[in-house]
Amino acid sequence: MAIQSAGLSRASFGYLPEGVAATIGEGQSALAALRQWRGLSCSQLSERSGVDLIIIMLAERGSDLMPEEKEAIARVLSVDPDMMGV
């Protein structure tokens, strides 16, 4: 059964979609690329995850996240926390 016909994405299995991987390869942070891929603004991600907006913005610029922040954001983005690269 194909991944698409099962209603799943490659990201469900720990793979980065090609567009996300290309964006990261061009220098954008993994967190920002994943957020944009899901069609969310920083504000929306903050509201849905419960992580302060400034923390998300700093993480997209290279600051580290606390493990619980990383988990909360990963849940909203439907990715493995290790895929975010922060």
Image: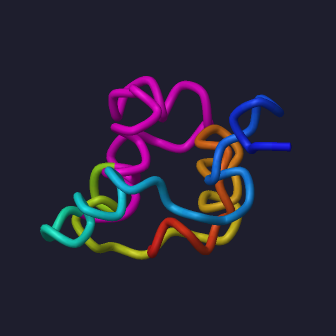
Report the label total: 0
Q: Is residue 68 above or below residue 53?
A: below
Outermost residue, front side:
1
In the displayed structure, does residue 37 sit left or right of residue 62? right
> Which SS does the magenta portion mostly show?
helix
Residue at 61% across / 37% down in the picture?
49
Q: Is 52 within the magenta?
A: yes
| Residue 13 in the figure: left or right of residue 45 | right
Residue at figure coordinates x 13%, y 68% from the top left: 26
- What's the magenta region? 29-56
Viewer-closest of 64 and 39: 39
**Which sits in the foreground, 20 or 33?**
20
Instruction: Tell me the quarter of the image containing the C terminus.
Output: bottom left
Image position of 54 with respect to 58: above or below = above
Q: Quadrant of residue 70?
A: bottom right
Q: Is residue 80 left or right of residue 77?
A: right
Nearest to the observer: residue 46 or residue 2: 2
Image quarter of residue 2: top right
Where does residue 68 sit, x and y in percent of width and height? 70, 62
Q: Position of residue 27 (x, y in %)?
A: 15, 70
In this rendering, the answer to whether 74 lies above or below 21 is above
Q: Residue at x 42, y 49 (%)?
A: 34
